[in-house]
Each structure stands twice: as C-alpha cells, then as structure tokens.
Amino acid sequence: MGHLTDDMNRLHDEIIAGHEGRKAFVADIQHNVAKMRADFQNANTERSKNVSGMLADVRADMAGGYQAFFGKSKAA
C-alpha cells in the first residue's frame, strides 16, 4: 500500500477510537450523574425526616412554654 492509503487507514482508526472514547466518556458521565441524583434524593429524604423531628420538638417546646406561662393550654 502507498503512504496515502496507510495515512487514510490510520486516520480512520483514530476517528473510530475517538468516537468510542467519547461514547464511553458520555456513558460514564451519565452513570455518575444518575448516582449523584440518587444520593441527593436520599440525603434530601433524610434531611426532611430530621426537619420534621425538629419541628415536632419546637411545637412541644412552644406548648410547654404556653402551659408554663398561661397554665393549661386552650386545647386541654
């Protein structure tokens, strides 16, 4: 084969390798983003549970303060 044919074959192989590399890179990014989103969702769910617990504590503290200041609460 001539030099031009060898160069064209090498260029073809480089183009194919580059395409496969980009394809693998994008697949890896998609996998990482999906994992990050799942981790964020789990963290958000856990944070929501913590905030709900803190809110219940604040309500209990406020009810206790009301009872200490005014006596029995209106609901009782």
Image (cartoon, grey):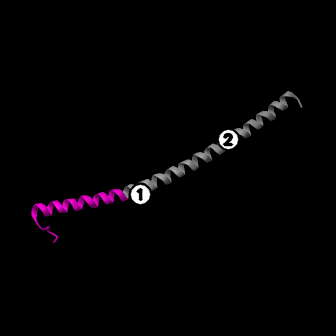
Identify the mark nearer the N-term, 1 or 2. 2
Q: Which residue is mark 1?
A: 45
* Left or right of residue 11, residue 66 in this image: left
At x 33%, y 56%, the residue is 51
Identify the residue at the far top of this view.
3
> Does 60 lie within the magenta span?
yes
> Helix or strand or loop: what does disc 1 sit on?
helix
To which quarter of the image does residue 22 belong? top right
Tell me the quadrant of the picture where the C terminus can be found. bottom left
At x 23%, y 62%, the residue is 60
> Helix or strand or loop: what does disc 2 sit on?
helix
* Left or right of residue 74, residue 47 in this image: right
Per the rendered image, the range of residues in magenta is 49-76
Of residues 13 and 28, the one drawn nearer to the viewer in this rendering: 28
Crowd tier of the residue under label 1, counting other residues whose Cα lies within 10 Å: few below 14, some 14–19, many 20 or above: few
Q: Which residue is mark 2?
A: 21
Crowd tier of the residue under label 2, counting other residues whose Cα lies within 10 Å: few below 14, some 14–19, many 20 or above: few
Rendered location of residue 23, percent (x, y): 66, 44
